[in-house]
Amino acid sequence: MRDQIVIKSGYDQFPAWERAFADAGIQAIRWEDRDDHLDAIRYALVWKPAPGDLAALPSLEIVFSIGAGVDHLVGDDLVPAGLPVVRNVDPGLTAGMVEHVLYHVIRFHRRMADYEADQRAGRWKPRLQTPASSHTAGIMGLGELGGACARALAGIGFRVAGWSRRPRVAEGVDCFHGRDGLAEFLSRSETLVCLLPLTAETCGVICRETLALLPAGACFINVGRGPLVVDGDLLAALDSGHLRGAALDVFHREPLPPDHPYWRHPRVTITPHVASITQPATSAPHIIANIRRHQAGEQLTHLADLALGY
Ligand code: GLV
């Protein structure tokens, strides 16, 4: 019998997953068809399973997260005790995130939101253009995605600062860490990019106190998770003009409710949680390699620690 992996995705990418796994002799099973394969499904590749979903797969041996974050797997009855959870490692997802972050940092740096407003008003108003080397992008979270964004920004000439929970070293990046390094990091971040995992510790980290530490006229990009931000505090910082703009891809509630003030705020740009999407062709090799390790009795790589939340 071929190895079987059941897939529950937020996108209709099943044919691409099927092709990517078939090349390795692994059969992909649609989530809707799982009841016909209960004894054979040893692996699950999932996004936002419901409580009890995974416990209903009696032969399950490994849970793979489709998303880069694993917060969707933290909670009662989501992952049966003892099952290993593997984080997603996807060069395609990383490349997509780098594109999104570069786009928004450059958009803010080049004042495109102002020019778009000028165009709507029929207003010809040139502004002094400053070089990228005079603008500091601050990346909060220097993991797989944050590290790649930091390197890419440094590569096109931005000054880059990075902040992480534990000390990290990244070439071309001024690295700060821990509570002690936060104020110094924020005070130089003219565009702050939040790519932290959502954990008990990071929930609400973007709040009145931290926003106040950003330089006047700073911009904010959230591509981590919505609950990292205290919405009321971000709106107040935008309303007061302390922040010049925010590009938000993730929200407390998704879809963002129609009456949420972000929708109509002139300084806010919204995308519907699409900053980057897992690409089956580039994601599957890592999953397959881990399945092979497991079958050979070797240690899995990129294990998540659900107690820590990443
Ligand atoms: C999406 O948000 C992801 O975790 O990949």
Image (cartoon, grey):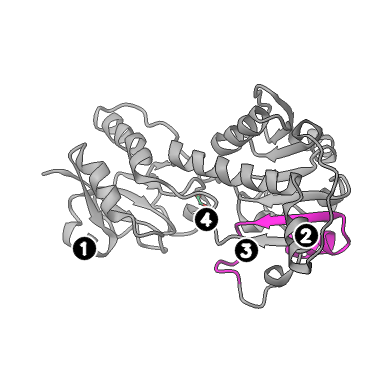
For the residues bearing labels 1 and 2, Cβ distance under 8 angstroms: no
Location of the C terminus (image quadrant): top right
- Asked if residue 74 is among those painted magenta in the image, a careful observer would answer no
Crowding near pointer 4: few (<14 within 10 Å), some, many (20+)? few
Determine whether, in the image, residue 87 is placed left or right of residue 158.
Answer: left
Looking at the picture, how far across and down is residue 200, in whole percent? 64, 51
Whole-number angstrom distance, CA of label 1 to CA of label 4: 31 Å
On residue 252, the disc is: 3
On residue 35, the disc is: 1
| Residue 280 in the image: above or below residue 52 | above
On residue 234, the disc is: 2
Determine whether, in the image, residue 6 is placed left or right of residue 116.
Answer: left
Name the residue carrying label 4: 274
Which is more N-terminal, label 2 or label 4? 2
Identify the residue shown where x is 84% and y is 59%.
237
Instruction: Please state which amino acid type lies under the numbered disc 1.
Output: Asp
Which is more N-terminal, label 3 or label 4? 3
Instruction: Please state which amino acid type lies under the numbered disc 4.
Output: Val
Which is more N-terminal, label 2 or label 3? 2
Callout 2 secondary element: helix
Instruction: Please state which amino acid type lies under the numbered disc 3.
Output: His
Which is more N-terminal, label 1 or label 3? 1
Which is more N-terminal, label 2 or label 1? 1
- Residue extent of the magenta highlight: 230-256
Mark 4 or 3: in front is 4
Determine whether, in the image, residue 117 is placed left or right of residue 1.
Answer: right
Crowding near pointer 3: few (<14 within 10 Å), some, many (20+)? some
Looking at the picture, how far across and down is residue 121, in whole percent? 79, 68
